């Protein structure tokens, strides 16, 4: 990777790509040199292949010495390489940066699994007893059926149980009245 070229303001010309100016209200960005060094920059233009930023002249040494830097702009992060440095004359530099790659962390999509699991657990706990009771009654009714219960030998047992329940109910009702 070669060092960025330093040219005066009069020699700076376009590279053939369309460059779009950035509104002043949206132009704030940040260049990160290391974990502890970062500086605020003004992003003046955006192109398909990079950015143009205005930075203080005190960062010129870091710009010419570095291959990759990190540019944070409008919530996105890009690894950029300085291509061209132009002195603006008022203690600032106009730097053209080529985009190496986009390193923006994707936003995590929160799922509603917790909510659905919670509702499912509540539904299971509410419906567990009625479901168990329904299955128990259905299986007992099958065992009491005349055709199926007689072949298994359980129909007579259920008939005697029903007779006992009827006798107990009759005794209970007679004792009340």
Image: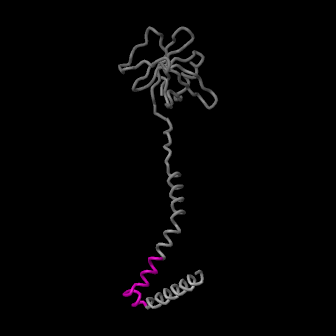
List x then y, in percent, for residue 102.
46, 34
| Residue closest to the far right | 36
Location of residue 148 by image quarter: bottom left
| Residue 9 in magenta stretch | no
Q: How many marks?
A: 0
> Which range of residues does the magenta coloring cover?
137-152
Relative depth, front residue between 8 and 176:
176
List x then y, in percent, for residue 55.
55, 18
Location of residue 40 by image quarter: top right
List x then y, in percent, for residue 155.
43, 89
Q: Is residue 52 above or below residue 34?
A: above
Q: Is residue 62 left or right of residue 95?
A: right
Relative depth, front residue between 43 and 160:
160
Relative depth, front residue between 29 and 84:
29
List x then y, in percent, for residue 144.
43, 84
Residue sitting at x 55%, y 26%: 66
Residue sitting at x 55%, y 8%: 90
| Residue 140 in magenta stretch | yes
Relative depth, front residue between 30 and 89:
30
| Residue closest to the far front | 177
Residue sitting at x 51%, y 85%: 166
| Main SS category, magenta section | helix
């Amino acid at each position: 990777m070669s060092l960025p070229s330093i040219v005066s303001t009069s020699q700076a010309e376009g590279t053939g790509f369309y460059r779009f100016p950035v509104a002043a209200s949206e132009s704030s960005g940040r260049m990160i040199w290391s974990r502890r060094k970062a500086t605020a920059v003004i992003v003046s233009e955006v192109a398909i292949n990079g950015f143009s930023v205005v930075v203080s002249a005190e960062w010129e040494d870091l710009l010419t010495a570095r291959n990759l830097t990190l540019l944070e702009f409008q919530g996105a992060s890009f690894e950029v390489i300085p291509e061209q440095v132009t002195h603006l004359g008022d203690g600032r530099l106009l730097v053209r940066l080529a985009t190496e790659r986009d390193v923006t962390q994707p936003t995590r999509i929160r799922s509603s699994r917790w909510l659905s699991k919670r509702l499912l657990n509540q539904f299971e706990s509410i419906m567990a007893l009625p479901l168990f009771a329904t299955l128990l009654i259905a299986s007992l009714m099958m065992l009491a059926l005349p055709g199926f219960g007689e072949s298994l030998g359980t129909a007579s047992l259920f008939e005697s149980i029903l007779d006992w329940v009827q006798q107990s109910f009759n005794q209970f009702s007679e004792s009340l009245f």
